[in-house]
Image (spheres, helix red, strand yellow):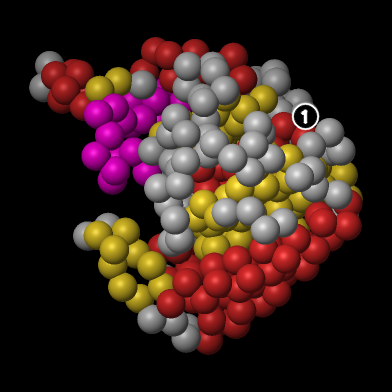
Amino acid sequence: MSISNKSLFLVEEAARNAGKTAREAFLNSSMKKRYKSPKDLVTDIDEKVERMLIEDLSKIDPVPFLSEEFNPEKEINEPLWIVDPIDGTTNFASGIAPFCISIGHWNGECVDLGVCYLPITDEMFTASLGNGAFLNGKPISVDSESDPMKTIAATGFADITHNSKKTTLNVFNSVIMKTRAVRRLGSAATDLVYTACGKFSFFYEAGLSPWDVAAGSLIVKEAGGIVSDFSGGENYMEGKTIIASNPEIYGFIKNEIDRNYSDKQTEMEEKNG
């Protein structure tokens, strides 16, 4: 099913309700933490928010869910809700903002709706396919900076902790010397929507999952940006790598990745001379 404007409003409402629950727990430090793996943290609020979203979104479109905490192995081969109840759980559990509630609707071929809500700053980013991107109801667009030294960029290091064969450390080492600044916020969904509204000129990361990028990638595209995987293709949903950028600076970051995205053995050899 395609998402209507009415449905988009209902998804925003679901995100805001879930965000209220997350914000209250964050401000009151009222959450229980556990580790799914040595470095993979989850809280009871992640799970509570997820249950809220499943209940509310199922009323809008009763399709299956793909989420970090629920059904994470589900293949993207049919219409789905793709949800991260709290993107940036480490931030959230540590009393650090930002964190983001991310909701994407996959229509069977592409993401046709994206909602990302940052509860602490009350920033509601939305987009539906072909209708532009918005922040709290006002249109947004990517920036137009073309000089790398004037850009603020964003990245993350999920690949370092997910046993990837390659790492982005060499990319970071190069990019940070050629840009004004590189930020690491700890929430890929936030990085994407901040690229969409021009706070960042570009974002790149490896080691991500569909729920990290589904909603934010559509918001970037609808804001006039370019989204690709590291090879320049369209496999950023399941390929674990993503570039999101304004059109003017995309060539710069793509070239940096082409030159510097290397396997761990190569990095060790370079380090050891």
Establish if 157 lies above or below 186.
above
Look at the image and give the residue range highlighted in magenta: 157-177
Quadrant of the rendered image containing residue 109? top right
Q: Position of residue 70 (x, y in %)?
A: 45, 60
Say which residue appears at 67% left-offset and 25% top-offset: 226
Q: Quadrant of the C terminus?
A: top left
Say which residue appears at 34% left-offset and 38% top-offset: 159
Binning the other alpha carbons within 10 Å of mark 1 as few (below 14), some (14 to 19) or many (20 upward) gives many
* Between 176 and 5, the one nearer to me in the picture: 5
Reply yes or no: does residue 17 show up in magenta.
no
Q: Can I make out residue 177 in this image? A: no
Q: Position of residue 50 (x, y in %)?
A: 54, 68
Establish if 88 lies above or below 47.
above
From the image, tell me which residue sits under label 1: 224
Q: Position of residue 141 (x, y in %)?
A: 80, 36
Say which residue appears at 22% left-offset and 60% top-offset: 38
Q: Is residue 116 left or right of residue 230?
A: right
Quadrant of the rendered image containing residue 265? top left
Say which residue appears at 61% left-offset and 61% top-offset: 101
Q: Position of residue 86 (x, y in %)?
A: 53, 63
Label 1 sits on what residue type?
A: Gly
User: Magenta span: helix, strand or loop, mainly?
Assistant: helix
Circle 1: element type: loop
Q: Can I make out residue 50 in this image? A: yes
Reply yes or no: does residue 173 show up in magenta.
yes
Q: Is residue 7 left or right of residue 118?
A: right
Establish if 222 lies above or below 234.
below
* Between 196 and 10, the one nearer to me in the picture: 10
* Between 57 and 163, the one nearer to me in the picture: 57
Of all residues shown, which one is farthest toward the left? Answer: 272
Establish if 73 lies above or below 28.
above
